[in-house]
Image (cartoon, rainbow, N blue to C red):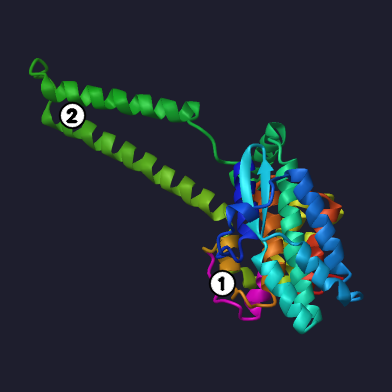
């Protein structure tokens, strides 16, 4: 889990990884993870006030190091600030609300990834509970190991094969006529065919329990959002965040952001949006939270769900 969050921390920070190499003499001292989070909080607080105090932009720009060096549990990360400094410089020349919002969202993403890495702890009991809940669903109720009936069928088949083998191999049983031998063969073939037919029927019945794969946008995004809100009302925060994320994907797909494809992963949906897309920061934040909560099994709560709804609002999905 720590490894996956570390990869997510680097991916969230490296939107402009092609930063020129910094000379060793100018390399800033390494920060601990709490110090890095504190630094992000300071920069984020200052960025949120720029719309009312634009004169502080030069000081904020000057306070940013070329790269943040973070020592987390003995692992050294380098998070470049080239994108932030470039966006701040562009905002100074042309102060627009959209560009400032992009800066704030970038900082929020860095802050979220750092906090997720700091609080990541293995929770075996929670994982076991989640796995048991999944296996208790209706689609898995007929999935089981080999039963006593299956073992009995297997033993009868082996016994019949051994009996036929002895009949063909032995010359000491002249009383067994060809009719009897062929009759036994026919019975064996019929029995095997019947068992195979029953197995195919059983497998086909199990397959019909599983939902058919359909495009995300086949279920309109307001339905996804309502289901997410219903899950939140029941206190099912993981499921609520999961459903809300797919509501955002359905919204973008219905807007023509990409062609429907049931085989895509969340990261592939994110890569389909151009870097200049106004929807990309919100979708990136939604994807990071989904990976942490649904796949990384991090704790989920009401605040996380409200933040997810806020990102949906930024995409243009009214959630109220």
Distance of label 1 from label 2 (alpha carbons): 69 Å
Left or right of residue 197: residue 89 = right
The foreground one among 296 and 65 is: 65
| Residue numbers of the magenta segment | 248-262
Q: In which quarter of the image is the C terminus?
A: bottom right
Q: In which quarter of the image is residue 20?
A: bottom right
Bin the neighbour count of mark 1 within 10 Å (Cα to Cα): few under 14, some 14-19, many 20 and up: few
82 w.r.t. 202: above or below: below
The secondary element bearing badge 2 is classed as helix
Mark 2 Cα-neighbour bin, 10 Å: few <14, some 14–19, many ≥20: few
The answer to whether residue 253 is magenta is yes
Q: Position of residue 186 (x, y in %)?
A: 23, 37
- Is 212 on the left or on the right of 47, as rendered? left
Q: Residue 180 carries which label?
A: 2
Q: Residue furthest right?
A: 52
Position of 160 relative to 297 (above/below):
above
Query: Which residue sits at x=42%, y=47%?
Result: 200
Which sits in the foreground, 182 or 189? 189
Q: Could you tell me residue 163's position as x and y percent?
A: 23, 22
Residue 311: say if magenta: no
Left or right side of 268 for 129: right
- Tags 1 and 2 in contact by the CB under 8 Å rule? no
Residue 18 rendering spot, x and y as whole percentages: 55, 65
Identify the secondary structure beneath mark 1. Answer: helix
Residue drawn at point x = 71 percent, y = 32 percent:
125
Does residue 236 appear in the picture of this structure? Answer: no
**Most distant residue in the bottom direction:** 94
Q: Mark 1 points at which residue?
A: 272
Q: Quadrant of the N terminus?
A: top right
Q: Nearer the viewer, residue 7 or 296?
A: 7
């Amino acid at each position: 889990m720590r490894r996956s969050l570390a990869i997510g921390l680097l991916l969230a920070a490296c939107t402009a990884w092609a930063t020129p190499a910094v000379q060793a003499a100018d390399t800033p001292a390494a920060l601990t993870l709490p110090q890095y989070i504190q630094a992000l909080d300071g920069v984020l607080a200052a960025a949120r006030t720029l719309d009312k105090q634009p004169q502080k932009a030069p000081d904020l720009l000057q306070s940013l190091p070329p790269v943040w060096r973070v020592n987390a549990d003995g692992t050294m990360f380098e998070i470049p600030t080239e994108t932030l400094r470039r966006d701040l410089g562009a905002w100074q020349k042309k102060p627009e609300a959209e560009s400032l919002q992009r800066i704030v969202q970038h900082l929020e993403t860095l802050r979220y990834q750092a906090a997720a890495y700091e609080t990541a702890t293995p929770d075996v009991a929670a994982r076991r509970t989640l796995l048991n809940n999944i296996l208790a669903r209706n689609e898995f109720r007929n999935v089981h190991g080999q039963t006593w009936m299956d073992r009995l069928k297997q033993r009868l088949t082996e016994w019949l094969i051994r009996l036929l083998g002895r009949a063909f191999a032995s010359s000491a049983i002249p009383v067994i006529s060809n009719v009897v031998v062929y009759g036994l063969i026919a019975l064996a073939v019929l029995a095997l065919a019947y068992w195979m037919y029953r197995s195919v029927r059983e497998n086909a019945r199990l397959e019909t329990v599983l939902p058919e794969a359909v495009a995300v946008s086949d279920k309109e995004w307001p339905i996804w959002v309502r289901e997410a809100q219903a899950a939140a009302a029941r206190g099912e925060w993981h499921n609520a965040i999961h459903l809300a994320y797919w509501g955002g994907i359905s919204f973008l797909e219905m807007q023509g952001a990409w062609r429907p494809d049931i085989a895509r992963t969340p990261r592939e949906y994110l890569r389909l949006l151009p870097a200049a897309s106004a929807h990309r920061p919100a979708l990136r934040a939604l994807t990071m939270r989904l990976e942490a909560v649904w796949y990384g099994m991090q704790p989920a709560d009401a605040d996380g769900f409200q933040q997810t709804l806020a990102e949906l609002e930024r995409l243009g999905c009214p959630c109220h």
